[in-house]
Image (tube, rainbow, N blue to C red):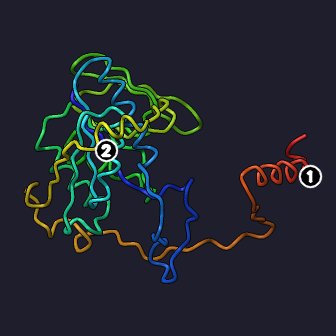
């Protein structure tokens, strides 16, 4: 089974203090530590496990600048067979539809049985997987937390639905799935694995390579534009806990005990 997983380079919230910039147009990005999007990492792990069971290959693809190559190499060190970087100045400022348009053009250059994305990325819109499926005219399932390969033409997927319930569906291949965290336990990526793929050539495809009109993607084509970033005002009675993780946990437990939430 040939699987393509869409991944994204995002700020690592565990390593950064996220602050809004002075204009309110974005977060402060100077000196941020970046990593692969958490949901995407689960999708890559699941793809690797499926390939190891039934054979085939795993390709990881990302839309971004030259620095986005690092997340492709990380996922290749994890076990993906190859990576593809989609990079062009024309892609800058693309909204969800623009990103799906770019990914669609790359996907149509190959032949994949299964296309996977994370359930959402740093924008939080959770749109690209569904848009991609619609553009490719393929079956789609979101919030997938279980995959069972039936045969070369079908898979069974489990989905999280409202109320903590589980839904099972049989889906025809090829299809698009958005993967939820918790579907597996992503494997550790060691220095040896990173060194192994450090010199592997990663192809870079721009708008011309993908047969895309630059006016169809990027900021000029975006139908959704960010208006403002802001930190919400604290509501009445809200309290922000400060200190190390351990100190915050201790303070939270004491507060819960004081308010009768923990005995």
Residues packed near mark 1 inside 10 Å, few (<14), some (14 to 19) or many (20 plus)? few
* Image coordinates for residue 147, horizontal then vertical, percent: 39, 25
Side of 89 where 178 appears, left or right: right
Q: Position of residue 5 (x, y in %)?
A: 30, 40
Where 246 falls versus 116 (above or below)? below
Question: Camera-side residue: 74 or 232?
Answer: 74
Quarter holding residue 101 = bottom left
Against 123, residue 246 (above or below) is above
Residue 261 position in % (x across, y down): 85, 46
Residue nearer the viewer, 215 or 35: 35
Residue designated by label 1: 258
- For label 2, the residue is 73
Q: Secondary structure at mark 1?
A: helix
What element does badge 2 sit on? Answer: helix
| The N terminus sits in image quarter | top left
Q: Could you tell me which quadrant the C terminus lies in?
A: top right
Give the distance between the C-alpha atoms of the residues marked 2 and 1, in whole angstroms.
Answer: 49 Å
Residue 240 percent coordinates (x, y): 75, 64
Indicate which disc residue 20 carries: none
Q: Residue at x 31, y 23 (%)?
A: 155
Give whichever of discs 2 and 1 has the lower sequence position. 2
Q: Residue sitting at 17 percent across and 53 percent down?
A: 204
């Amino acid at each position: 089974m040939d699987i393509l997983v869409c991944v994204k380079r995002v700020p690592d919230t565990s390593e950064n203090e996220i602050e809004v910039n002075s204009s309110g147009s974005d977060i402060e990005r100077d000196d941020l530590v970046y990593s692969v999007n958490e949901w995407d990492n689960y999708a890559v792990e699941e793809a690797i496990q499926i390939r190891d069971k039934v054979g085939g290959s795993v390709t990881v693809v990302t839309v971004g600048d030259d620095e986005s190559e690092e997340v492709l190499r990380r996922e290749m060190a994890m076990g993906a067979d190859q990576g593809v970087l989609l990079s062009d100045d024309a892609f800058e400022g693309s909204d969800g539809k623009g990103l799906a348009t770019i990914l669609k053009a790359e996907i149509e250059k190959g032949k994949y049985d299964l296309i996977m994305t994370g359930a959402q990325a740093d924008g939080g819109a959770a749109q690209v997987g569904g848009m991609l499926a619609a553009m490719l005219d393929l079956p789609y399932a979101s919030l997938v937390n279980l995959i069972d390969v039936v045969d070369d033409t079908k898979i069974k997927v489990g989905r999280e639905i409202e109320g903590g319930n589980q839904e099972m569906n049989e889906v025809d291949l090829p299809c698009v799935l958005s993967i939820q965290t918790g579907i597996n336990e992503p494997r550790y990526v060691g220095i040896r694995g990173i060194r192994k793929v450090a010199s592997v050539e990663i192809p870079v495809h721009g708008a011309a390579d993908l047969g895309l009109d630059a006016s169809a993607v990027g900021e000029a084509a975006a139908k959704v534009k960010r208006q403002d970033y802001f930190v919400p005002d604290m509501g009445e009675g809200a309290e922000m806990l400060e200190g190390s993780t351990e100190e915050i946990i201790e303070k939270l437990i004491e507060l819960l005990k004081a308010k009768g939430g923990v005995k």
